[in-house]
Image (spheres, rainbow, N blue to C red):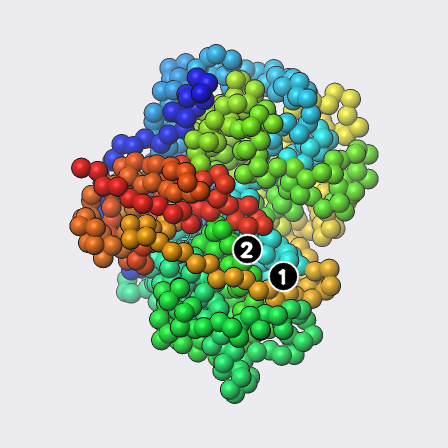
Amino acid sequence: MAESNQKAIQNAQTSEELTGMKVGAPSTVAAGLPAVVSSMKHLIGEVGALRSAQVMFKLNQVGGTDCPGCAWPDPDDERSGLGEYCENGAKAIAEEATTKTINADFFRRHSIDELATWSDYKIGKAGRLLQPMVLRPGSRHYEPIAWQDAFNLAAKHFNDLHSPNEAIFYTSGRTSNEAAFLYQLMVREFGTNNLPDCSNMCHESSGVALSKTVGIGKGSVKLEDFYEADLILVIGQNPGTNHPRMLSAMQKAKRNGAKIISINPLPESGLIRFKHPQHIGEFFGQGTPLSDLFLQVKINGDVALMKAIMKRLLEIETSKGGVFDHDFIQKKTEGYEAFLSDLEKQDVQRLSEECGISLEEIEKAVAMIESSPKMICCWAMGLTQHKNGVANIQEVVNLLLLRGSIGKPGAGTCPVRGHSNVQGDRTMGIWEKPKPAFLDALDKEFGIKTPRHHGYDTVEAIKAMYEGKARVFFGMGGNFLSATPDTNYTAEALSNCSLTVHVSTKLNRSHLVTGETALIFPCLGRTELDTQAQGDQFVTVENSMGVVHQSLGNLAPLSQKLKSEPAIVTGLAQALFPNSVIPWASFSQNYDRVRDRIEKVIPGFDRYNERVRQPGGFYLPNGARDGNFTTPDGKAHFTVNEVPHHTLAANEYLMMTVRSHDQFNTTIYGLDDRYRGVSSERRVIFMNRDDIHERGWHGGDIVDIVSHFEGEERRANRFLLVPFSIPRQCLASYFPETNVLVPINSFADKSQTPTSKLIRVTLEKQD
Ligand SMILES: Nc1nc2c(c(=O)[nH]1)N[C@H]1C(S)=C(S)[C@@H](COP(=O)(O)OP(=O)(O)OC[C@H]3O[C@@H](n4cnc5c(=O)[nH]c(N)nc54)[C@H](O)[C@@H]3O)O[C@H]1N2
Ligand SMILES: Nc1nc2c(c(=O)[nH]1)N[C@H]1C(S)=C(S)[C@@H](COP(=O)(O)OP(=O)(O)OC[C@H]3O[C@@H](n4cnc5c(=O)[nH]c(N)nc54)[C@H](O)[C@@H]3O)O[C@H]1N2
Ligand SMILES: [Mo]
């Protein structure tokens, strides 16, 4: 193996050092006073009191800053005067608005090899990047470079490629609509559709399943639908940690009479009880009980569970009728007969064993569904990151269709998005499989000829770099190395490149595993004021429910050398295409000009500049929401999906990788997972008590994890056992420490999403 590859693999490793785990009882209630205390600790520690107040009062307010955390929508009506925020929003702000900074001297003192020995936590806490940096061939230290030189250097590498398809342009989901639109335009003018994004690892399975079945790859519900629903299913999602403001919506739904069923291998605190952190009166007492029924499903047991529920509904329908919405099924759907004949063959007893939910519990769910005409299904990574991720979601759609629970108020699909603008980035054309109509519109508007063949998604991009078919990697945000599967393989892939470039706010491990040359382009964060030639600019984003609205920073930028993402793209584009027909320079001067072009290219953005200036923004068109299914035949589609079977040997387990309460993806805010009762440690593995006992092991024992896939083994060493409430032969560990175990070839059918929630492993106890 080449020396550079060895270095890359070494630098890709997260430290195996244990940090002193403490285990207490998991919380039974989410948010409340501890959430407020934790928010303050992070904010005051990183940002200082004054700057915190400046940004927090503006957060998620009309005309304020969109929280850089999750994509949960802001309520149209009652926003809290204190800023509409949550504990983890406060941590996201603390992370970005921190006053700690990394200057050129930092890189003189620390080589990339030394920085790689730091934990991800320590790397992130080093502070904000301030100026463009370059790592020259053979050097182990980044050094400063002027912006123009950096753009020219990158352009030279791009132009030296044999084909535009040898370049990869990745996007994370924080990039604004304006930056994303300009970025994809630059990439397509360059001549490729190699635009993989974090969606490929996230909700791609939702996009594929929903486009096929209901004609739009986005969710159908609005926030108000929560307040009208009779029943809300929360499947494979941990809102208490990852979408805390969703708990407020669920609390309001409950007060309006809704029931909640949660389906999860873990009893996540946020799904049990909740105290609103912005309602002081709720700090004392028990909080609102949220879930009426918790179904502790086995990992990947969801299709079996859904089928069991639907089979029982069918039996009731057959005996007394009134369960299925026949009018809806007949007028609006296709594929009912085939679906029914498959369902008739299912055996509820068997399905119950497959999913680990007793017949009695299934009956409770059935009774709740039967008596609820308006049902919403919410889901996230617990459904998407599986080999059958697409099937998981199609099965949820089947249930909704049977009940006519889509396309009417109080009902529908709710894939809860991750990054704050991941949905908007796709709308703007960040996609490796663009539709011809979109490319035609670009060609017409800009007088260019965009490439038509599909580009690489995330998994394909890694393989292309590994195999030497791609040689330049450009990352618009994100932390590609740590977020992707098979860390060592990806490290080799990146180190095969001639150039790796990252547009980033903060240092992360991807800056330490590089191509022969590496560049860091430091950018403004959401919270910072973005001043361009024609004055202060706002950007726009789209939330999880298809609302497009403004985000305006108000903090003074940490350095004059930071550029906005739109300015970085236009700067690079000018270096890349000196004779372009596209007026690149003009776009960064005034973002209204970008929005005018978006309006011409993308449907639904009529009078963009005007409408986005209205308080709260505007909704994008959504056929499924209106019961108008935009599939080729205009119908919603039932599908037939297989039940996955996993036969495990006595010492084999299925492992899911999840987020702790103290991280945003690969950004580690702290070492605690308060709701699950673990503190000061991330190298933990949650395991069923009886399974631990059966092996003769104890909580606190140290194990190595070995994953098994197609005859290959991958290892992650030194994890502490935590006895936990989780089904037998199921395990949970944290992402990104265990990404090294996710095989590059283990991805979902049709969506190619890495199977981060379904890793077959064995455990080896250390002596
Ligand atoms: N604070 C914070 N907020 C975030 C993020 C963050 O890291 N930190 N990340 C953002 C991003 S990009 C995303 S995509 C979202 C992620 O939001 P989530 O999807 O909630 O995140 P995960 O921690 O991956 O949790 C997945 C949940 O699915 C469950 N699960 C796993 N496997 C299965 C299964 O087979 N069946 C069922 N029914 N459940 C299963 C797990 O127990 C866990 O509760 O959050 C976004 N918001
Ligand atoms: N095993 C496992 N792997 C997973 C997952 C899992 O559940 N398990 N989840 C997957 C999912 S759902 C996702 S979405 C991906 C996430 O993958 P990514 O989006 O690639 O990763 P993040 O950790 O969110 O990226 C963090 C970095 O973004 C940069 N950044 C932050 N804010 C900004 C900004 O405003 N502009 C720019 N340019 N940069 C910024 C900072 O430098 C920071 O270090 O990971 C996936 N990987
Ligand atoms: Mo995500």
Which residue is disc 2 drawn over?
390
**Front one among 324 and 122:** 324
Q: Establish whether ligand 1 lies closer than 8 Å to the Cβ of label 1.
A: no
Q: Residues within 10 Å of mark 1 (few under 14, many from 20)?
A: many
Can you tell which mark lies on residue 213?
A: 1
Picture quarter with the N terminus: top left
Picture quarter with the C terminus: top left
Can you tell which mark lies on residue 374?
A: none
Residue sitting at x 41%, y 56% = 646
Residue sitting at x 52%, y 66% = 376
Q: Is residue 423 above or below residue 101?
A: below
The residue type indicated by label 1 comes to Thr
Q: Kindly check if marks 2 and 1 are in contact, taking CB atoms under 8 A apart as contact.
A: no
Q: Is residue 439 above or below residue 628?
A: above
Q: Residues within 10 Å of mark 2 (few under 14, many from 20)?
A: many
**Residue lying furthest bottom in this view?**
320
The residue type indicated by label 2 comes to Val
